[in-house]
Amino acid sequence: MELTANEIEKNLADVRARVAEACAKAGRDPKDVQILAVSKTKPMEDIRAAMSVGQHAFGENYVQEIDRKYAELGDQVEWHMIGHLQRNKVKYIIDKVRMIHSVDTIALAQQIEKEAEKHGVTMDVLLEVNIAEEATKWGFTAEEAPAAAKTIGAMPHIRVRGLMTSAPYTEDAETNRVHFRNLRLLAEKIRGENDPGVVMDTLSMGMTADYTVAVEEGATIVRVGTAIFGARNYAEK
Ligand SMILES: *Cc1c(COP(=O)(O)O)cnc(C)c1O
């Protein structure tokens, strides 16, 4: 069931209002929080509806889908890769995405470095951290992350901009507050090490179920799909 353009516009206004409210509660400037509209599986009309009300950044999980959507819109908007990325697919997105949120191994970073060098770009990346230590999730552990940041930051065509996490599925956003706080504390610890190539100014955390709590805990990017575009039907991807 696809939403109408009007519904998407209204949803986006709603998400913006809730982000602003969470910022007010936490004494933060809403300008410091980027709303990434997660458009995976959703058609171009939906992206255009969001664009019509000023949405400029879109998150996607699948390389082929980025390829197809980029062919239509190019750099009119920012594309962010947020899904698990296989090394052999880096070459398809290296010159299309503004940021890769899902760097979860050193080997993947090495492949990004290689392709970025080939294309003469410096890629902004986030290290995915499995902050709640879920068996099913990709990502570095909190213990591994500082050394990984140092190693990846030293790669000349990569800038480590921060950390990303997908918190556990929950019906009660409050239960994820501790994970968001822990991710922020981990980023602060890594920032304190002043590693070359490591900037640590970005925290990508919070999805439809819990983005307001993530903002209260310091998110600088929230990745919101369902609350903007409605439920996904993976069969139609
Ligand atoms: C799909 C996805 C989202 C968006 O999830 P919603 O619950 O629909 O907001 C955010 N982050 C990642 C990594 C995703 O895969």
Image (cartoon, grey):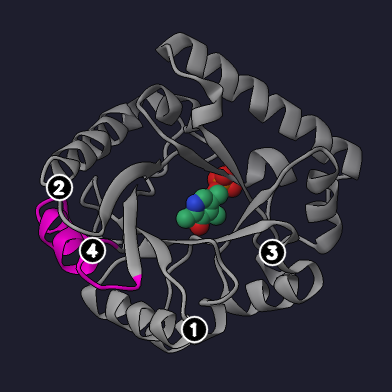
Within-10-Å neighbours for mark 4: few <14, some 14–19, many 20+: many
Q: Are marks 1 and 3 in contact (CB under 8 Å)?
A: no
- Callout 3: CB less than 8 Å from ligand 1: no
Name which residue type carries label 1: His
- Callout 4: CB less than 8 Å from ligand 1: no
Disc on res. 41: 3
Q: Earlier in the sequence, mark 1 or mark 4?
A: 1
Name which residue type carries label 2: Asn
Circle 4 SS class:
helix
Disc on res. 119: 1
Q: What segment is highlighted magenta in the picture? A: 139-157
Where is residue 225? Give x, y as percent. 62, 47
Q: Earlier in the sequence, mark 2 or mark 3?
A: 3
Q: Taking 200 as reference, is 21 above or below it?
A: above
| Residue 129 visible in this rendered orientation of the protein | no
Residue at coordinates 22% horizontally, 74% vertically from top-left?
Answer: 106
In the image, is residue 94 part of the stretch drawn in magenta?
no
**Image depth: mark 2 or mark 3 in front:** 2
Residue position for label 2: 194
Disc on res. 157: none
Residue position for label 4: 153
Question: Residue 227 falls in which quadrant of the image?
Answer: top right
Q: Earlier in the sequence, mark 1 or mark 3?
A: 3
Circle 2 SS class:
loop
Q: Are marks 1 and 2 in contact (CB under 8 Å)?
A: no
Name which residue type carries label 3: Thr
Within-10-Å neighbours for mark 2: few <14, some 14–19, many 20+: few
Q: Earlier in the sequence, mark 4 or mark 2?
A: 4
- Callout 1: CB less than 8 Å from ligand 1: no
Circle 3 SS class:
loop
Q: Residue 196 or 152: which is nearer the viewer?
A: 196
Q: Residue 80 or 134: which is nearer the viewer?
A: 80
